[in-house]
Amino acid sequence: MAAAVEAGGFFLGSFGWALLGVTLPNSYWRVSTVEGNVITTSTLFENLWQSCATDSTGVYNCWGFPSMLGVTGYLQACRALMITALLFGFLAIVCSVVGMKCTKVANGNPEVKGKMAAAGGCMFILGGLCGMVALSWYAFNITRDFFDPLFPGTNFHYALPKAGPSRLRRGSDASTGGQYGKNAYV
């Protein structure tokens, strides 16, 4: 009976570790969809490593975050926690395999096998906690930003061109910036 519980715990821990490994590169951690008619429908989605956009025509564009210091603090912490969770899970699998009763490694010393199994179980728990904190923290930030009316996030404002002679006259100033400066978007 103890060997079955041990093997069941090992397989559940390994399955959880595999799910964390599949979750990390998934692109759909944060999704923002703007629906309109067929031409203006667009979807923005991102994960811990990159941000992507697609539109209704099927154009798909991704760009990685430029640097470690260029992202927010919680995103850096979530990256570190997810990588730590995967490392804890890998070490837990190694320790648990060595410590399980059904393996022949260190078979002559049951005390070492017990300590290795306990260490593997503790590492599975620590890895699970790291993954749970990272995912919960990321979800909390998404929810907070969604309900914050002052969040300066993705806003879709479409600038319509101004008509009339004054706009045509200022059109020649576009290369020099005119009255608004060289980098102004007017």
Image: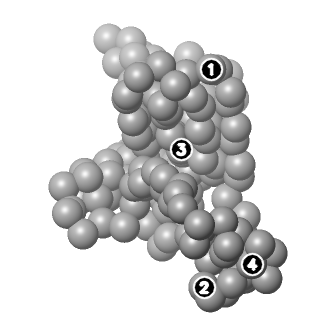
Q: Which residue is mark 1?
A: 57
Which mark is nearer the camera, 4 or 1? 4
Q: Nearer the viewer, residue 20 or 28?
A: 28
Q: Which circle marks residue 173 in the picture?
A: 4
Percent x, y for residue 7? 45, 17
Quadrant where the image shows the C terminus: bottom right
The answer to whether marks 4 and 2 mark residues whose Cβ atoms lie closer than 8 Å is: no
Name the N-terminal-most of marks 4 and 2: 4
Residue 57 falls in which quadrant of the image?
Answer: top right
Which mark is nearer the camera, 4 or 2? 4
Q: Residues within 10 Å of mark 3 (few under 14, many from 20)?
A: many
> SS for tag 4?
loop
Query: Residue 47, relative to residue 93: is it above or below?
Result: below
Name the N-terminal-most of marks 4 and 1: 1
Name the residue type under label 4. Answer: Asp
Name the residue type under label 2. Answer: Tyr
Residue drawn at the location 32% of the way across and 11% of the way down: 1
Q: Which residue is mark 3?
A: 46
Which mark is nearer the camera, 3 or 1? 1
The mark total stands at: 4
Name the residue type under label 1. Answer: Thr
Residue drawn at the location 41% of the way across and 23% of the way down: 37
Find the distance from the CA under tag 3 to the CA under tag 1.
19 Å
Query: Residue 162, relative to residue 69: is it above or below?
Result: above
Residue 147 falls in which quadrant of the image?
Answer: bottom left
